[in-house]
Amino acid sequence: MYREAVHVVESGIADVETVDRACRNAYSLWATLCGPFRWMDISGGPALYAKAMSGVLPTLDNSTELPETLQKMLDADADGTLDGNGFYQYAAGDREKWEELFRESVWHVKQFQDKHFPIEDE
């Protein structure tokens, strides 16, 4: 999903914000907080995802190279909200805002899962 999201942006089909919005709308409960680009920013940063993807890309297709966008993020050691360098620009205080939104989102998903899909004790 992350790789395809980058491909859509690099192909000029949509921008980062549009892809994120489309994913939030399409994936519903799974992605109510954010799409793949914001998720990469708040969960370790684009450079971390680029490092992980560089090892699995050869098993997905014939490409053995990272998409250019992710290579640039890796070269810049982009840590997303941790250092303000990601797919989005972050000002002072944004990291805390996104961390709080992340915690709230996870809590709401957990409440939904517990209500509709309870795990029964064995």
Image (cartoon, helix red, strand yellow):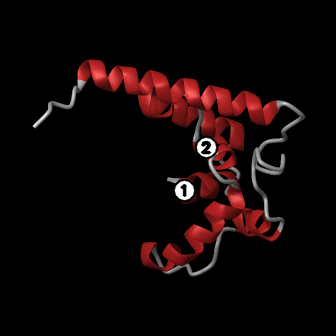
In screen coordinates, is 22 left or right of 88?
A: left
| Label at residue 39 | 2
Task: Estimate how packed mark 1 is, as few (under 14), some (14 to 19) or many (20 or more) residues with alpha carbons within 10 Å.
Answer: few
Foreground disc of the pair 1, 2: 2
Residue 91 position in % (x across, y down)? 89, 35
Q: Kindly identify the residue that appears in the image at 49 percent across and 30 percent down.
A: 106
Residue 96 position in % (x across, y down)? 75, 32
Q: Kindly identify the residue that appears in the image at 65 percent across and 47 percent down.
A: 13
Q: Quadrant of the C terminus?
A: top left
Name, please, the residue furthest toward the right.
Answer: 92
Choose top left, top right, bottom left or bottom right for residue 76: bottom right
Q: Is residue 104 visible?
A: yes
Q: Kindly identify the residue that appears in the image at 56 percent across and 68 percent down.
A: 53
- Residues under labels 1 and 2: Cα distance? 14 Å
Q: Earlier in the sequence, mark 1 or mark 2?
A: 1
Choose top left, top right, bottom left or bottom right for residue 55: bottom right
Mark 1 sits on what residue?
4
Label count reads: 2
**Image height check: is 47 above or below 121?**
below
For label 2, the SS is helix
